[in-house]
Image (tube, grey):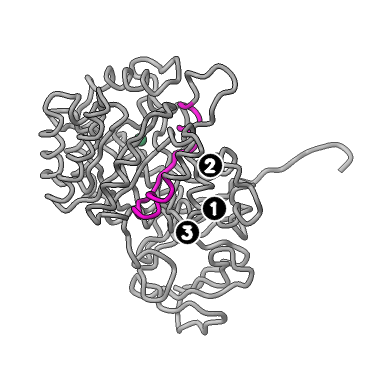
Amino acid sequence: MLFRNGLIENATEGVDIRVLDGKFAAIAPNLEPLPGEEIIDCTGKLILPPFIESHIHLDTCLTAGQPSWNMSGTLFEGIERWEERKQFLTKEDVRSRVKKVLHMQVANGIQHVRTHVDINDPKFTALEAILELREEVKSFINIQIVAFPQYGILSYPKGRELLEEALKMGADAVGAIPHFEFTREYSVESLNICFELAQKYGKLIDVHCDEIDDEASRGLETLAARAYETGMRDMVTASHTTAMHSYNNAYVNRLMRLLKMSGINFVANPCVNVHLGGRVDNYPKRRAMTRVKELVAEGINVSFGNDDIFDPWNPMGNAGMRDAVFMGLYVGHMLGYEEIMKSYKFVTYNAARTLHLGDAYGIKEGNSASFVIMDAKNYYEVLKDNATVLASYKDGKLIARTEPAKTQVFVPGE
Ligand code: FE2
């Protein structure tokens, strides 16, 4: 196949892409078509590597209002509503909801997903279902599973044993939730356990870290210190870190040195952070997103996720990555022209680093031919016009296609 004249990653000049045997065989201007080669015109269309969802809870998706709605809009009422919904959990229920979300993601050009799965469940209902699906769907989407102790490692009966069992069952990464543990001591110890298990089983780490507007929530410094000391560095990810929004600046100045030394990744979830955050404030109300702009300025890797799609913590969501970037730029004061243009990296290359996808990810000769074609000439237009993902190719195979909507306007005097 020859993809003609596409604009790769905001380029202003079109180039041709030849795909052979599922790989990018050649990328150059004006390639000569081979005899009988299928030609796809991409003139004026942006071509990007596939989108990546670096933080979602697939097991809770599509459960909003079942059996009751989160009326206060708080994180903690969300946990209570989920506790009610969990009573009805079956493998079939999880499988059918997760499949629906995966299809929504594929339609939106996503090909890699890191999902947290609640393992504070002695039956491992959700984990078993998603482990099975990880195998079944791998031809069109790559799923990475974080064993997520929703109610804590030390503050939930047999929390440590459940976490270890989930890793033995095949989870890819170890989770923790230090701000939800009963005490400061449990918080620190839960992170020690997290590192001990990650090293024992050779897993990545992704922690729900300081997802609270409490400026005294300091799980991040422990996480970063352990990442540095153990040498696990960029195998470690701090998700949310919303308390960092509320830290005093003198503390952040000191903390930033450790964060850079540690090499850890960050994931912000702009829509859910701004929705759940600031809930105990009168006015002014905090935005509650971590300090994305400052982290990026220090060269620290940050990606954006959705966290939740139509569940007790987020009543909205279409599973695409555009809304996360759009909200992240607004909330983070990052709507400068250059910031907008390069913001696709939050949901492509930066997320690929977090997921440890390596050099196999990206549009270059020799790599698997996985990419999306957008109905826009650059990423600025994608965000501004909410552009359609026209096509998504994985390993050279078309896995999703969307026709752009056509609108006609009938007004007098035209
Ligand atoms: Fe989360």
Q: How many labels were placed on the picture?
A: 3
Where does the C terminus fall, quadrant-wise? top right
Numbered label attached to residue 372: 3
Instruction: Tell me if residue 212 comes above or below residue 381 in the rendering.
Output: above
Chain part drawn in magenta: 255-277
Numbered label attached to residue 328: 2
Which one is earlier in the sequence, the residue at label 2 or at label 1? 2
Instruction: Locate residue 321 relative to residue 63 in the image: left or right.
Output: right
Element type at mark 1: helix
Q: Position of residue 213 (x, y in %)?
A: 44, 27
Q: Position of residue 63 (x, y in %)?
A: 35, 26
Where does the N terminus fall, quadrant-wise? bottom left
The response on whether ligand 1 sits within 8 Å of label 3 is: no
The one nearer the camera, 42 or 29, is: 29
Instruction: Tell me if residue 398 comes above or below residue 77 in the rendering.
Output: below
Q: Quadrant of residue 412?
A: top right
Which one is earlier in the sequence, the residue at label 1 or at label 3? 1
Q: Is residue 74 magenta?
A: no
Going by the numbered disc 2, the residue's amino acid type is Gly
Instruction: Tell me if residue 202 comes above or below residue 42 in the rendering.
Output: above
The residue where tag 1 is placed is: 343
Does the residue at mark 2 contact the one at mark 1 (Cβ under 8 Å)? Answer: yes
Label 2, label 1: how many angstroms apart (C-alpha)?
A: 9 Å
Front position among marks 3 and 2: 2
Label 3, label 2: how many angstroms apart (C-alpha)?
A: 22 Å
Instruction: Locate residue 214 relative to residue 337 in the image: left or right.
Output: left
The one nearer the camera, 70 or 254, is: 254
The one nearer the camera, 346 or 320, is: 346
Front position among marks 1 and 3: 1
